[in-house]
Amino acid sequence: MEWLYCRVTKAIVAKENLLYAMNSTLPAPLQANGFPRIVSLLLNVAHGIDHMFLLIFATAVASIAAEFGFAKWEDLMPYSVGAFAAFGLGALPAGRLGDLWGRRVMMIIFFIGMGVSALLVALTHSAWQIAAALTLLGAFSAIYHPVGIPMLVQNAPNPGAVIGLNGLAGNLGIAVAALVTGFLVKWIGWRAAFIVPGIIAIACGIIFIITCPKELHAPSKGKGGKAKVVLAPALLARVFLVMTATAVVSSLLFNFTTNGNAQLLTEAFRGVLEDPAVLGALLALIYMIASFAQLVVGRLIDRMPFKPLQLWMSVIQIPLLIIAAHTQHWFLFAALLAVMIFVFGSIPFTDAMIVRYVDDRLRSRIAGMRLTVAFGISSAAVWLLGPMVKSMGFATLLWIMAGVAAVKAVIVLWLPEETA
């Protein structure tokens, strides 16, 4: 996958230098992290793009399956596993290149690559074609987390709040995927659900090229922001193990829910409400409300002891998932909203742990290693989702997810004791 980034970079950097030279406007006021506000905004928008693009397929899968000749959406769902596998496996080379080449160049590749690959998805006409195009999309989507988030929080005095706002942006992208995809599928067709966001991503990339200042040196060659908490090597290794294991189970919960919720609502409201646009709007409402939990959690991370906060957020997911397994219609809507508040609310912890324990020179590489393991393993959730629902039903799946949440709570107990 690294060779793909290299090939794309040669073409982009030449254009990037020309556009940067043409930009003669005065520099925008810098924020605490050293970037103009427009750049910070684009880095947050990029998080929304990252999550949105990966979930367009899950929202539109029923329409795509019907066009491609599949009797049930569950049979087409496993073809998207390549996207999530690449999302995880690609994080390692992306993080390494982010530290060695510079984060600005990698984010340009992200924006343009996401846009172009989304347009390629829209051109497909068979299951294996869309599998290949989605895998390419996943490869470019792998860039954001190990590169974009460390870029956003470098030198930030309040990293928890910054990560919380960034998490809100990412999950609003999930909400937009549910809402916009539902309406575009209904009014135009599933291909438009990839074309419109693809064009927007490319436009964001062009604006980013023009407005983001060039880096004086790559992160690996700078002094870098220091870790907030300095640990002995043995404890640091333990933290990295806990961080990775927590990320694996968190990603399993995230992938099971975000990829299955559209079909879960469809099944729960069958005979009561069956308009895909309205169901998409309901799911978008769930995601929008749940996304704001990350703002609250992000601020709490800066102010409270880290371990008990994360433990409490993990434990409460267990009964909520069990309740969701035994409800229907509007009761399921309420239960699913509660579940997603805590699933989304738990997202800032892993990124906050990297800022807390790792200095800036290594953050992209450490994030890439963690994401490769976590997302690589959790991509199995996407592959298993369709067959599991087909053979066992959503109720059993939700019970299994409650068990995963319990495992996560046990893992969090291994974090070292320290105060915020």
Image (spheres, rainbow, N blue to C red):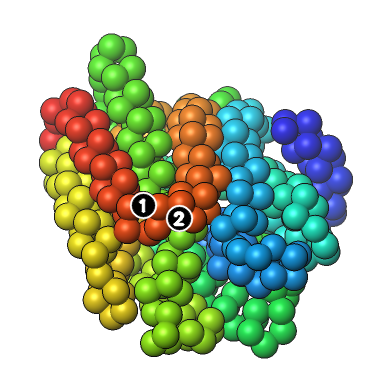
Using the numbered discs, state the Cα–Cα distance from disc 2 to disc 1 in whole angstroms. 7 Å
Residue highlighted by disc 2: 389
- Quarter placement of the N terminus: top right
Residue 220 as seen in the image, left or right of residue 130? left
Residue 19 position within the rendered picture, expressed as x and y whole percent measured from the top left: 80, 58
Q: Alpha-carbon neighbours of circle 2 within 10 Å: few (<14), some, or many (≥20)?
A: some
The amino acid type, in three-letter code, at marker 1 is: Leu
Quarter-of-image position of residue 75: bottom right
**Residue 164, position as x, y percentages in the image:** 34, 56
Q: Which mark is residue 253?
A: none
Residue 345, x across and y down, in percent:
29, 56
Q: Which residue is painted at 61% across and 49% down in the image?
A: 78
Q: Disc 1 marks which residue?
A: 397
Residue under the point 25% across and 70% down: 327
Q: Pick the residue in front: 291 or 46.
A: 291
Q: Amino acid at mark 2?
A: Val
Which image quarter: residue 31?
Answer: bottom left
Residue at disc 1, secondary structure: helix
Q: Is residue 109 above or below residue 367?
A: below
Look at the picture and state if 270 lies above or below 388.
Answer: below
Q: Tell me what residue is drawn at x 49 percent, y 34 percent.
A: 377
Q: Is residue 43 left or right of residue 155?
A: right
How many C-alpha atoms fall within 10 Å of the one at disc 1: few (<14), some, or many (≥20)? Answer: many
With 348 as the anchor, is 122 left or right in this view?
right
Report if the CB atoms under discs 2 and 1 are less than 8 Å apart: yes
Question: Above or below — where is 157 with respect to 43?
Answer: above
